[in-house]
């Protein structure tokens, strides 16, 4: 079996581990920097060309598309799909999950627990927006933020109002969210492969920090999930149509709530915290499903 890892950087921990795990299981692994591929999209025999040579005879692809590369990255994944190659996450599902708002709308519709959340751009009715999520304290987020940057805790009504006004001046999209104080500055990363959570860790923010991001000085440890947490993570991944997903949960008074579903979850933090061979489990899933899939019959792009 021949498997392509679509990744811009062969030296990244996740890319290296997937390649290594695949080779260890006896498969032919190749890292393809997708931005350097071009495609013949009109031919009746669709192809992808890399370094002057068509990429042929692949049985499966594992997309590791960077957040800022979603458009071109998903186009390459889609091209593999029209060529009949199995992708462990479909291009459609990756695009869907990259839009945080779309993600929450889908999860809400599917009955997955979420923090009470409002979404706004330039509302004049700031009081109404604050009331929607039950008043202060509340969390305000820039939709485009990452690694905890652009996530603000407003403890009082006045602070919330000032921050929303300031963000409104930036002409940007904002999320206003119920503050889950009882989470105690921690979140749970549930790593879903197929219909199972194969590894889970708890990330705890630095002292006095409500954001648990490892980039903000948090630390991670292995954790055992409750059945409710496990079910929520699996349901969230399924609602998004993702076979491999990192689902982030908060432990709230009203049960587990989903903050985010990631379609290219990193392997380093979770493998180091749990000592689980996550890369190996992804390869096993890919091999089993590439063999059984008949992607040629499906129209799913
Ligand atoms: N409503 C909330 N209540 C309590 N804590 C929260 C809430 N929202 C976010 N946090 C904390 O802040 C951290 C960062 O928030 P979030 O994950 O939404 O943004 P981000 O990490 O910047 O975005 P991304 O995950 O897309 O990179 C979370 O991991 C969590 O610990
Ligand atoms: Mg986050
Ligand atoms: Mg994220």
Image (cartoon, grey):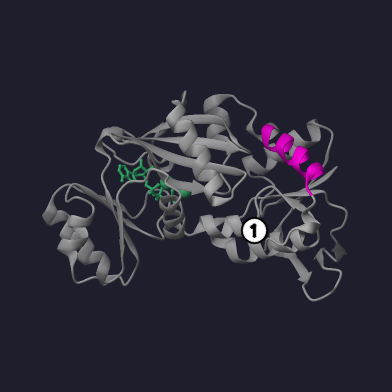
The C terminus, quarter of image = bottom right
At 27% from the left and 65% from the top, the residue drawn is: 167
Name of the residue lying farthest toward the left: 158
Q: Position of residue 34 (x, y in %)?
A: 70, 60
Pinpoint residue 140: horizontal percent, then vertical percent. Answer: 28, 54
Q: Residue furthest bottom?
A: 42
> Pointer 1: what residue?
91
Q: Residues within 10 Å of mark 1 (few under 14, many from 20)?
A: many
Q: Quadrant of residue 14?
A: top right
Which residues, given as a range, are shown in magenta?
A: 281-293
Depth check, front residue: 166 or 94: 94
Q: Position of residue 289 (x, y in %)?
A: 75, 42
* Quadrant assignment, res 56: bottom right
Residue sitting at x 52%, y 27%: 273
Residue 120 appears left or right of 248: left
Tell me the residue at 49%/47% (across/down): 261
Q: Residue at x 77, y 69 (%)?
A: 39
Q: Is residue 220 visible?
A: no
């Amino acid at each position: 079996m021949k498997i392509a890892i679509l990744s811009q950087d062969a030296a990244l921990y996740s890319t290296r581990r997937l390649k290594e795990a695949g080779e260890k299981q006896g498969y032919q692994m190749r890292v393809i920097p997708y931005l350097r591929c071009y495609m013949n999209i009109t031919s009746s025999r669709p192809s992808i060309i890399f370094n002057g040579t068509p990429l042929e005879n692949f049985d499966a692809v594992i997309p590791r598309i960077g957040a800022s590369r979603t458009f071109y990255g998903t186009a390459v994944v889609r091209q593999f799909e029209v060529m009949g190659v199995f992708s462990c996450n479909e291009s459609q599902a990756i695009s869907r999950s990259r839009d945080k708002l779309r993600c929450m709308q889908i999860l809400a519709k599917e009955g997955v627990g979420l923090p009470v959340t409002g979404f706004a751009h330039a509302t004049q009715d700031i009081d109404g927006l604050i009331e929607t999520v039950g008043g202060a304290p509340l969390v305000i987020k820039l939709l485009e933020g990452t690694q905890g940057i652009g996530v603000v805790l407003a403890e009082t009504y006045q602070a919330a109002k000032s921050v929303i006004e300031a963000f409104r001046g930036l002409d940007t999209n904002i999320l206003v969210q119920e503050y889950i104080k009882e989470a105690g500055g921690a979140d749970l990363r549930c790593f879903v492969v197929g219909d199972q959570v194969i590894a889970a860790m708890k990330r705890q923010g630095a002292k006095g920090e409500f954001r648990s991001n490892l980039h903000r000085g948090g630390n991670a440890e292995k954790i055992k999930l409750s059945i409710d947490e496990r079910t929520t993570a699996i349901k969230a991944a399924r609602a998004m149509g993702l076979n491999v997903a990192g689902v982030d949960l908060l432990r709230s008074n009203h049960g587990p709530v989903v903050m985010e579903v990631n379609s290219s979850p990193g392997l380093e933090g979770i493998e180091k915290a749990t000592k689980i061979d996550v890369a190996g489990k992804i390869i096993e899933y890919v091999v089993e499903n590439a063999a059984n899939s008949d992607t040629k019959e499906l129209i799913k792009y």
